[in-house]
Amino acid sequence: MQALPYQNYLFDLYGTLVDIHTDEDSPAAWEALARFYGYYGARYAPAGLQAAYQAEVDRQTAGKQGLRRDSHEAHPEIELAGVFQALFQAKGVPADRALAVHAGQFFRAMTTTRLRLYDGVPAMLAMLRARGGRLYLLSNAQAIFTACELRALGLEGAFDAVYLSSDYGCKKPDRRFFDLLLTRQHLDPARSIMVGNDPICDAAGGRAAGLDTLFVRSNLSPEGPLPQATFTLPAMDIPRMGAILAGEAVHPG
């Protein structure tokens, strides 16, 4: 069996392995969340709760906003449990972190209209691991959401380590986020590849961190030309991605 061309495989999550759609403007979601807060004595009208949420997000992200924020990333530059906790506290309810996390997860469930793996993801990850590859997740995401979604999708335990931007206060394409993973996991960038669907966060960010890169254009990728990358896939094709990552197909960027 041919040896893998890389030792370490760093994956983005949403738009790379996972197809997701969220709607944070859903009136039904805000009505349900207002009801949830009311159960604990924090009474909001749905529109008032939505406005308070956005104001608190704006307050906590002031000066931290990055290049791009997709709704499914849910404000990855901050730890969002603090926002849901502040919404309780604004109404005089001394909510602990556990309740704040529960509120956030309830909201995520109410605003998510699609959550699935792209076809072939489990087989690809299993193949790379069986052949000695080490798998890492490096995602602009909220830990209070992503841990549950990984479990729901059967990806819990699929990675050697998981790095989510909300845990570290920085996000791709910030070089610091890449270096956190590389340094803490003692990875050689020359033996590592970043796989993602964002031309700036994943392709350019990975390249700046000294990594080879595989860019895949998915339904969640920003519009624009294909970026400079070691390998490019112009459309989502997990079997083809796996073949490239295993060194069994040549598809240069």
Image (spheres, helix red, strand yellow):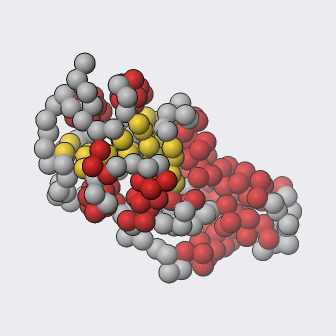
Measured as percent of width and height from the top left, residue 99 is found at: 78, 55
- Please provide percent x and percent y for residue 222: 29, 58
Horizontal side of 43 relative to 246 (left or right) equals right
Nearest the viewer among 163 and 197 is 163
Q: What residue sits 13% from the left and 44% below the top?
A: 252
In the image, what residue occupies the spot 25% across and 27% down? 3
In terms of depth relative to the viewer, which is nearer, 249 or 31? 249
- Considering only vertical position in the picture, is 213 above or below 128? below
Q: Is residue 128 above or below residue 144?
A: above
In this view of the protein, can residue 72 be seen by the observer? Answer: no
Residue 100 placement: quadrant: bottom right
Residue plotted at (81% across, 60% down) = 96
Question: Does residue 246 sit above or below 29 in this rendering?
Answer: above
Please state the horizontal and vertical placement of residue 47, each as a whole percent of the image. Answer: 65, 68
Residue 219 at x, y = what percent?
A: 32, 46
Image side of residue 250 versus residue 176, left or right: left
Q: Is residue 126 left or right of residue 84?
A: left
